[in-house]
Amino acid sequence: MWQYFFPPLFVVGILGNLTELFVLFSPGMRNRANNLLSAMAFADIAFLLCLLPHSLVNYPSIATNHLFRIIYFHIKYESLAFANWSSAAAICFMLVVCVDRLLGIRSPLYSRKEWTKRKTCSLLLGIVVGTGLLTAFHHVSYHCFYWDLCNGTQIHSKCFHVAADTWGKNETNPTPQWLRNYVRMGTTLHALFGIFFPTIALIALNVALVRELKKRSNEPLLASEARLQRK
């Protein structure tokens, strides 16, 4: 998957989002909806970039490179933490876009009202900060050990989850209890408010959007039938 599926997905995702940003930032395209789509594109690009090292490590010629191993071992779980952060932010941006579109269809006057720059920045910053706090536990979820072999020519690493009861072969986990509880609570909250509830909300919003569009498309037909009946 990492060797053959992710690379083309990475290229298409990066090029697609860069093209989208080029279009959205062109003159005459700046509005509320496009600002939200631009933020979502930036989050998608960040997500793909954070996952790139985990794809590269599956290629032997790269994985055995000493410099790459040093960098990768030190950023492995940090990059995953930032990937979860950008993913959660992208989901929230998508939710706001869906809500904005639904309100625009239900109320044509709403779509003509533009947000102030301060309101837009506050919303985007609130989403970035909120999702950052929601996924912050990922930065402290693992404790890693590093050591050199073969006269410093090979670096190896082993990581342990801080919430695990034991490390390795029944070794005591020295992580403070408060940190274990924080990681466990963060994992649950992220699963609920970063994945499960947003997914349900997206499904519900898209169903409502389709129903509203269908209702709108039937209105001209109903109006014409009413006129024919009056005649």
Image: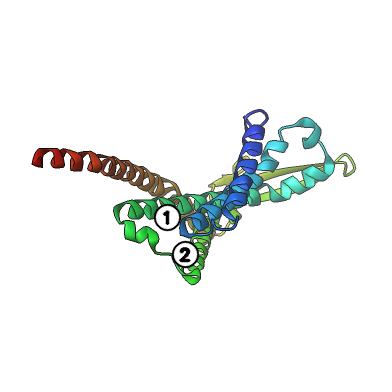
Residue depicted at x 40% and y 50%:
98
Residue depicted at x 62% and y 44%:
48
Q: Are marks 1 and 2 in contact (CB under 8 Å)?
A: yes
Q: Residues within 10 Å of mark 1 (few under 14, many from 20)?
A: some
Location of residue 199 in the rendering, given as x and y in whole percent from the top left corner: 40, 44
Location of residue 70 in the rendering, given as x and y in whole percent from the top left corner: 79, 47
Residue 45 seen in render: yes
Spatial distance from mark 1 to mark 2, Cα to Cα?
10 Å
Q: Secondary structure at mark 2?
A: helix
The residue identified by callout 1 is 96
The residue identified by callout 2 is 123
In-image side of 10 versus 114 (left or right): right
Q: Quadrant of residue 12?
A: top right
**Which numbered disc flags the more N-terminal residue, 1 or 2?**
1
Location of residue 49 in the rendering, given as x and y in whole percent from the top left corner: 66, 46
Q: Residues within 10 Å of mark 2 (few under 14, many from 20)?
A: some
